[in-house]
Structure formats: structure tokens, C-alpha cells
Image: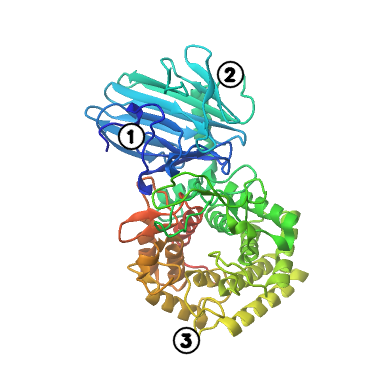
Amino acid sequence: MRGTPAGQQECGGGVGPEPLRHYALLADGERGVVVGPHGDFAWMCAPRWDSDAIFSTLIGGSGVYTVAPLGRCVSGGYYEEGSLIWRSRWVPEDGVVECREALAFPGDPHAAVILRRVIARDAAARVSVVLQPAAGFGRHPLRDVTRHDHQTWTGRTGDLRLRWSGWPTARPAGRRGQGLTMDLTIEAGDHHDLVLEISDRPLSDRPPDPAAAWRTTEAAWHQEVPDLDHAIARRDARQSYTVLRGLTGSAGGMVAATTTSLPERAEEGRNYDYRYVWIRDQSYAGQAAAVASGGTVLDGAVRFVTERLHEDGPRLAPAYTVDGRRIPDQRSLDLPGYPGGFDRVGNQVNEQFQLDGFGEALLLLASAARQDRLDADAWQAAEIAADAIAQRYRQPDAGVWELSPRNWAHSRLTCAAGLRAIADARAPSPHSGKWVALADRLVADTAAQCLHPSGRWQRSPEDPGLDGALLLPPLRGALPADDPRTIATLRAYTEELTDDHFAYRFRHDERPLEAAEGAFLLCGFVMALAEHQQGREVAAHRWFERNRAACGPAGLYSEEYDVSQRQMRGNLPQAFVHALMLECSVRLAQPWPRP
């Protein structure tokens, strides 16, 4: 709680960064908004995920859009189930005030429509509204502000056009009039709609009707999100699906996260831009969606990965922009960054080779094939991926964690899993025998180089350590659940890299696990699946419940969880964590399928 909400500050004053658990997400597939507890938009890139930010206070930039009650209050909020419609909720000294907010869904790749409906529940409410967008991470203030009627304004920031509707008492604010502000009084039981349009193209002749936009958005979310009646933790499972759907654009690509440069560990340099489509993460999400129900998340993943394989073949990049372009080189923005983090955009993954991406692509395509959702192009993409594995599996790669190139065991075993899965889905076929033989060769070669003297898998020929990623290949069918190497790896990992049902990727150095980095939530959910595969249901559910709770009130997951401080770390929301949470929710509801 703050004595003075953001709306009472001078226009453009902004709001300081909050712990990540306090933020919520609005998304429409084409871009996202990170909403703070004080009615502030802390982050939004427009017109698309990897564009420059128009609201960037999250990493020390500028740009403000706040809606908050005047006076002392306690803040909270919740999602309307099965949607990314968020209700910011404040309890002042009398009455309750809510702001129902969403990006109109599904989104247009060129134009965002932001809906905010302020509601006075049981007493009259006084609300302050401040808008001062600044494109280019704050470099381009608002200009050309024009009033067109008693409640509509237009303006520009950078190359973006803006239009606001529902501002009857708005007035220019700031020293140079580079924003708008107004105070609203809303009677008990009444509401007031605000609509903000942001576009890189000329706007339509008339602003959207708020009531119609709300109806369309509600109906679209209802159509897109499955019931998931067969899942455990159904409500949370549905929310994970909505997050994955909200991060998936019309071209099929799903960004790994909405944000950039949020630190995994303060001042240790692990701050990256995740506003791009990772083939691996996309495949995780598609496989989870296939287990859950299919739908847009699965079909979009298949389409995006298929197109990339046809375009790049054995040169498949680890990640792309949402429209399939090369990711820009990493650079700094000359901003303070989120506390403990930096201000980076772009990603040096564009220079890496990641062999496991081919294996994950095959696992994705096999999951879709089992639901009869592959066309001829997708089957040809599977052949391209399998051929690429045959060509490149001896080459060192950056691996799942994007480290220095080595012959990582996980990468090769994941390719074996993908080859077995697609061979099974394609059988009978002339390719199936060839793919199974290649999978056998990969497992044999990996065992010759990466089998620890204790009988478990080790990370690489040069690194005898354990790795949470080595738990995944048996889950995907690289080798059986009862294979001694599977059992030995799971036992050793549990003993050495987990603590109180939190899991860590690998050991960085001699420090305690929690001192080197946060617990890795993906690994925690993988542990739940691994125990489930072994038939240990109580242990599986304990792992699931422990890691399911490592989120904020909005139910969003970041990449890591700081166990000692009980704080979220890394970019938000992290798609692959939501994907594994969703998969766990469905798989744990029934016995593990036997071969």
C-alpha cells in the first residue's frame, strides 16, 4: 500500500519498480502489458512483442498510464477465469473500486486496443487517470495532441498513432503538455469506460464501442480456452493455458516472455531479452497443449516450427522474432534497468547452434500427429528435422541452457526421443526404421561418452555433473522409465540438486544451491512428471504442489524462485514454466501411459 497512489503524482512521475509477484499480465497474442498494483502500466511494447516499449518504467524508462483511486487504499486483483481479463481491485477507506482491464482479444498485429472499465462497487469513488506514453523506451514523448470532441483525443509518439476515448474532463498535463490527466467521480454501482488505441498504421474513422469490444473479448477467450475438466488444479491449469494463448500471435509464434532484462540473480549478469520465439519453448508449449486439448496453441506451434524448418533446414536457429526474422544483436538502452538487472534488448542466442531444437521440434510434430493435425508440409518438416539431426549430431552445441558449445548429453538424448516419437507416429513408413536406427545410435554414442561411472547420465564428456535437463529425455521416450540409467539419474539428481521439493538446474560452484541461483521451476515440474512416470504418485503431487505455489497473486510464473526470500526471479511470465505446469496438471490426473 502507498499513501499516495500513482495517479496523484505529476503526469509522467511514474511508479517505482515492485517485486515481480505484484504484477499481472494483459495480452492479446501480438503484445502484452505488465500491470502494477497501483493501476500503472509498467511495461508495454508496441505494436508487437519485440518493438520498442511505449511504457517502460519496469526497467527505468518512462511512459505512464495509471488509473487508481485517490487517497489511502489497499490493492489487489484477480483474473476472470479462463481469460486474461484482469480486475485491479482497491479497498479505500470506504467502498471498493475495481478497474476491469484487458487488451481487446484477439489482437491485430498492427493495432492494440486497451480496454479499462473503472467500477465503483458500493460507494462513490474518486479516481485519478494519468496518460503520458513515450515510445522508444522513453525517447519519444507524446506530441500533436488534439481534442476532437468532448471525450476523444489523438496524438503521436515516435512512429505510433494514438487515440483515447472516454476522457470527458481530460486536460493536458506535464510541463510541456506531453500527456493527459483527469479526475473522475463515479457514483456507487456505476462504471466508466476508457479506450486507448495504439497503432503503427492510420486509425479507423471511429473509435471502438467499449461494450462491443468487451463482448468480443469475452467471447473470444471463452472460445479459445478449454474447460480442462480432466486436469487437477483445473483453475490454475486453465490460467496457464490462457497465458500460453496470450503469448501466441497470429503467425503462430509464442514469445518466451513478455519482458526483457529482469534479473535471475541480482548483479550477476544473467539478464536477457526473452521477447522472442524459442523453438524449444514453443515445442514445450505445443506438447503441453496437445496433452490438454490441442487448440490454437498447438496448431500455432506446429505452423511456426514447420515454416522455420522449411526456411532454414539444418541451419534452424534457436529462436526467432514473432514473424520469423533473425533476432537482433544484443545492445544496451542506457536505462537504469530493473533493480539488480540491466537494460538489454536483442539476444546473442542468434549466434548459437542448439541441437536439441530439432529433437523438440520432432516431439512437437509427433504430438500433433497423434491428434491427426499434421498436413503434408508438417510431415516434410519432420523429415527435414530428422535429416538435420543425422547431419549435425556430432557437432558441439550450446545446449538447453545456452552455454559454451559441447556435446551435451541432453541435446543428443532429446533428439533420440524426437526420432522415436515421430517414427512411432509415422509408422508404418519407409522412414520409421531409419529414424529408430538413428535414435539407437544417438543413445549408444551418448552412453559411450556421457555415462558416469555411477551408472547415471552426466552433462557432457568433459563435465561429470548432474543436470535437471537430463530428466526430460526419458519422459519423452528416449529410453524406458525402468532403464537403469533413468533410475540412477533421477535418484542422484534428487539427492544432489533438490531441496525441500525445489529443484535446481545444475551446480554452478561450491556455494549452496540457493546461493548460486534460484530454484528452477521448470525442473520442479519435470520432477513431478519423473516421479509420476515411476509410479510414485504421492511424491509427484508433492513436487507439483510445491512448485505450483511459487507464483504471485496473479498466478504468473517467472523463470526462477528465490527460496530464501520467497521472491520470483527472471522474466515474466516465463512461458515454458506455464507449459510444464499445464502438462503436469493433465498428466497427474491419470496413470502414466505405458508403452
Quadrant of residue 589 within the rendered picture: bottom left
- Measured in 3D between alpha carbons, the distance from the residue under mark 1 to the one under mark 3, in whole angstroms, is 55 Å
| Neighbourhood count class around disc 3 (C-alpha, 10 Å): few under 14, some 14–19, many 20 upward | few
Q: Assess whether mark 3 and mark 1 are in contact (beta carbons under 8 angstroms).
A: no
What secondary structure is found at the residue carrying circle 1? strand
Residue picked out by circle 1: 89
252 or 334: which is nearer to us?
A: 334
Q: Is residue 77 above or below residue 232?
A: above
What secondary structure is found at the residue carrying circle 3? loop
Residue picked out by circle 3: 454
Sequence-first tag of 2 and 1: 1
| Neighbourhood count class around disc 2 (C-alpha, 10 Å): few under 14, some 14–19, many 20 upward | few
Residue 295: x and y in percent read: 58, 48
423 relative position to 150: left or right: right
Residue picked out by circle 2: 206
Q: Please give the name of the residue rendered at 72% of the width and 53% of the height, measured from the top-left corner.
A: 375
What secondary structure is found at the residue carrying circle 2? loop
Sequence-first tag of 2 and 3: 2
336 or 18: which is nearer to us?
A: 336
Answer whether residue 84 is visible to the viewer in this image.
no
Q: Is residue 562 above or below residue 99?
A: below
- What amino acid type is highlighted by mark number 2? Arg
Q: Quadrant of the C terminus?
A: bottom right
Q: Is residue 79 above or below residue 420?
A: above
Residue 230: x and y in percent read: 46, 54
- What amino acid type is highlighted by mark number 1? Arg
340 or 298: which is nearer to us?
A: 340
Q: Assess whether mark 1 and mark 2 are in contact (beta carbons under 8 angstroms).
A: no
Q: Is residue 468 above or below residue 167?
A: below
